[in-house]
Image (cartoon, grey):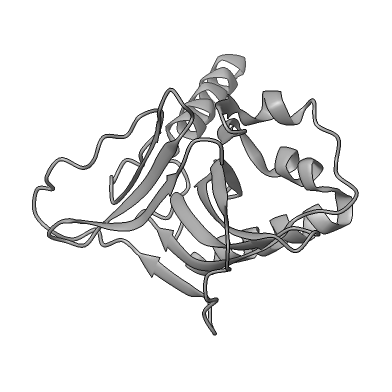
Amino acid sequence: MKARLALLTLAAVALVAAKPPLRFQPDPSSVIAAEIAFNRLAQQKGQWTAFRETAADDAVMFVPQKVLAQDWLRKQADPPASVTWSPSIVYVSCDGNLAASTGNWKRPDGSVGYFTTLWRRDKKGRWHWILDHGDTLATAREAPEFLTGKVATCKGGPRPEGPPVKGALPPPDESLVWSANVAPDNSRRVTVNMWTGTTYETVIDDEVKAGS
């Protein structure tokens, strides 16, 4: 009997280990909700606290040099008042595991700019940001009346080679890919490309000059 119970236990463990990872729907609204919650957390608990609590362990940001976010954020004290922000459009990979959002931000002193954030789901389906960057603008971009969400297609034949992805972990379906190229003077270019079924469409192309 003991031997049989041991075998049953081993079989159960094997079944758990063989269980496929959870699959999530490509839902732009969940990314928008994550952005709204991120902004709310910053207002309630502090700007850098919110960034720490929502960043993945391998997340990167630019200050202006590229840094591992958690290492840098650990040393930062929250400012008296946080920047506020809102996404304008969200792009999601067809497997629902990677997303990019971009929109406007505003500082307490009235200065404005834009941001782009890359998001990745964890095993439990929670979104954590893996790249955050932005720049100042003389005038804020026109905000849309309604937030927009777009999903990459999973359809199409063999895909052509996508753009180079340095330091990124592209999703298995490769329907949403990104790159962050940083020059020695700390100027940078962040791009996001989405698969349309026949080609990659550049949906975000941010260029930040040195010193920004």
In the picture, measured across the screen, residue 12 lies left or right of residue 93, that is: right
Percent x, y of residue 23: 44, 51
Q: Nearer the viewer, residue 15 or 46?
A: 46
Percent x, y of residue 193: 30, 52
Residue positioned 59% across, 23% down in the render? 5
On screen, residue 115 above or below 186: below
Where residue 20 sits, quadrant-wise, is top left
Residue positioned 44% across, 70% down in the render? 149
Residue positioned 54% across, 85% down in the render? 145
Percent x, y of residue 35: 63, 59
Point out the image quarter for the N terminus: top right
On screen, residue 69 above or below 121: above
In the picture, measured across the screen, residue 145 lies left or right of residue 172, that is: right
Q: Nearer the viewer, residue 59 or 174?
A: 59
Point out the image quarter for the C terminus: top right
Decide if residue 27 is in sight here: no
On screen, residue 168 above or below 30: above
In the picture, measured across the screen, residue 78 lies left or right of residue 19, that is: right
In the picture, measured across the screen, residue 150 lies left or right of residue 202, that is: right
Decide if residue 29 is in sight here: yes
On screen, residue 73 above or below 36: above
Percent x, y of residue 87: 57, 65
**Extreme-right residue of the structure:** 80
